Image (cartoon, rainbow, N blue to C red):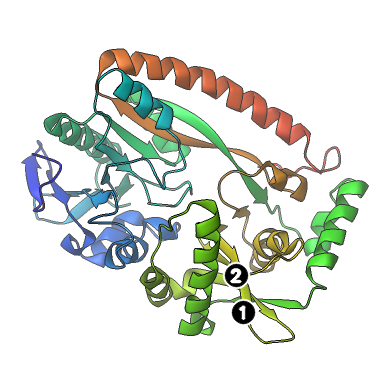
């Protein structure tokens, strides 16, 4: 099997038939979601198919779908995994550029590689998706990882990378021989606050005053913020948000990952999960900024932000504090505000471990990567401990995760 095949291929295992799909059109949405579950919106058929149908992934993007599907003897899907053939390392948020450069300098070809991931989405969630009523779930997870290795081996690929799996999946993959890498993000935990003031009361006095000052300044600049969800998010809001996204993408990356159609499809297919914070100028009635969030089972996931002008502290208000307000009001335990940003710590977002799994074909290169990963894990752990100690909470007031 070559990685460029466009038709599903099946291989027989003792109990299952494993198919490689070139797109989600090859599986019914309800059957995919029966494996994906309902807690994490990013692994849903709706989200992943919106990426494909909008042209955000697929031909010409460097993200070629190679999704895995395991059926039982009656053809019923038992397990699936979002999987892509990658020709670059953009849009992943677990950086392996140095690995690619080292491999190329040694005369190897790092790309293409296999990526088990949700494109452009550094959110922890299941990557080995198994029906809850399937027999022997661990055997199915094992079969998915084995299928990835077989696919990479037959195609002569350099590596496999499963990014932002759950901690349990990371442990499972490590036991199967994958290298486990640790990273960190900054998440806010809601232990059951009554309101935002209840959260502020857990902070040191100086930190509490700083946040109040930021919120006051952000909300007295002539921009009114409001949270939209479900049917309140109209086509014009998505058009406006795409302008914000493009403005930010041009400054940060030079090339946007997501298309205009993606946001419209997201609203059509996952509108009830969308929490869109929109900012409108009081004087003109013009929408000038927006922060896109999606709701999961117990988390609010901050995804994209954009603004057409420079407003002091408005980014913190729209992306962090309004997300916390929403989580408190709706009883959500976590707010995940995206990758990177140590500035989040002083606003209550503390370090939390993330994970990835890596399979390297060449034994010598694998040993070098293994040494790097172990050293990195120790440094990340020390960094997390230091940042947590540096957090804004009074002694004894930090939420117990």
Q: State whether residue 292 appears in this view.
A: yes
In terms of depth relative to the viewer, which is nearer, 113 or 395? Answer: 113
Instruction: Describe residue 252's horizontal placement relative to residue 41 as left or right.
Output: right
Reply above or below: 372 against 278. above
In terms of depth relative to the viewer, which is nearer, 150 or 167? Answer: 150
Q: Which residue is mark 2?
A: 290
Secondary structure at badge 1 equals strand
In terms of depth relative to the viewer, which is nearer, 193 or 214? Answer: 214
Could you say which quadrant of the image residue 18 lies in?
Answer: top left
Reply above or below: 129 against 25. above
Mark 2 to mark 1: distance in Å?
A: 8 Å
Reply above or below: 238 against 105. below
Question: Which residue does the image show at 45% across and 41% down from the upper left?
Answer: 166
View extreme (right): residue: 205
Instruction: Describe residue 301's horizontal placement relative to residue 137 as left or right.
Output: right
Viewport quadrant of the C terminus? top right
Secondary structure at badge 2 equals strand
Q: Which residue is mark 1?
A: 287
Where is residue 92? Give x, y as percent: 42, 44
Where is residue 107? Give x, y as percent: 25, 20
Question: Which residue does the image show at 21% across and 65% down from the upper left?
Answer: 28
- How many residues crowd around disc 1 within 10 Å: few (fewer than 14), some, or many (20 or more)? many
Q: State whether residue 298 appears in this view.
A: no
Please give the count of numbered marks on the rendered protein.
2
Where is residue 331? Give x, y as percent: 64, 63
Question: Which residue does the image show at 54% across and 52% down from the upper left?
Answer: 252
Could you say which quadrant of the image residue 290 lies in?
Answer: bottom right
Question: Which residue does the image show at 34% across and 55% down from the upper left?
Answer: 36
């Amino acid at each position: 099997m070559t990685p460029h095949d466009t038709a599903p291929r099946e291989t027989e295992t003792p109990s299952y038939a494993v198919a490689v799909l070139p797109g989600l059109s090859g599986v019914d949405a309800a059957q995919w979601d029966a494996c994906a579950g309902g807690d994490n919106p990013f692994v849903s058929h709706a989200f992943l198919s919106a990426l494909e149908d909008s042209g955000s992934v697929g031909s010409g993007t460097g993200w070629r779908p190679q999704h895995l599907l395991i059926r039982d003897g009656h053809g019923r899907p038992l397990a699936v995994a979002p999987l892509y053939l990658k020709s670059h390392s953009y849009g992943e948020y677990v950086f392996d550029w140095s690995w690619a450069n080292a491999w190329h300098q040694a005369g190897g070809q790092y790309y293409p590689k296999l990526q088990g991931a949700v494109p452009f989405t550094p959110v922890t969630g299941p990557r080995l998706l198994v029906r809850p009523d399937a027999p022997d779930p661990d055997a199915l997870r094992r079969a998915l990882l084995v299928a990835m290795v077989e696919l990479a081996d037959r195609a002569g690929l350099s590596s496999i990378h499963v990014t932002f799996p759950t901690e349990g999946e990371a442990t499972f993959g490590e036991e199967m021989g994958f290298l486990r890498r640790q990273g960190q993000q900054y998440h806010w935990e809601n232990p059951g606050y009554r309101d935002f003031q209840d959260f502020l009361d857990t902070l040191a006095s100086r930190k509490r005053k700083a946040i109040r000052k930021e919120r006051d300044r952000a909300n007295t600049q002539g921009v009114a913020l409001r949270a939209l969800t479900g049917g309140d998010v109209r086509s014009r809001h998505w058009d406006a948000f795409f302008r914000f996204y493009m403005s930010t993408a041009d400054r940060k990356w030079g090339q946007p990952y997501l298309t205009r159609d993606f946001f419209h499809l997201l609203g059509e297919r996952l509108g009830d999960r969308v929490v869109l914070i929109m900012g409108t100028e009081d004087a003109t009635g013009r929408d000038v900024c927006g922060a896109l969030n999606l709701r999961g089972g117990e988390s609010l996931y901050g995804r994209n932000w954009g603004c057409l002008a420079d407003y002091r502290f408005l980014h913190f208000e729209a992306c962090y504090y309004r997300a916390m307000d929403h989580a408190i009001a709706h009883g959500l335990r976590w707010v995940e505000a995206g990758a990177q940003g140590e500035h989040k710590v002083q606003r209550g977002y503390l370090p939390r471990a993330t994970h990835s799994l890596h399979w390297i074909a060449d034994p010598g290169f694998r040993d070098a990567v293994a040494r790097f990963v172990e050293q990195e894990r120790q440094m990340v752990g020390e960094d997390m401990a230091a940042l947590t100690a540096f957090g804004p909470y009074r002694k004894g007031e930090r939420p117990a995760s």
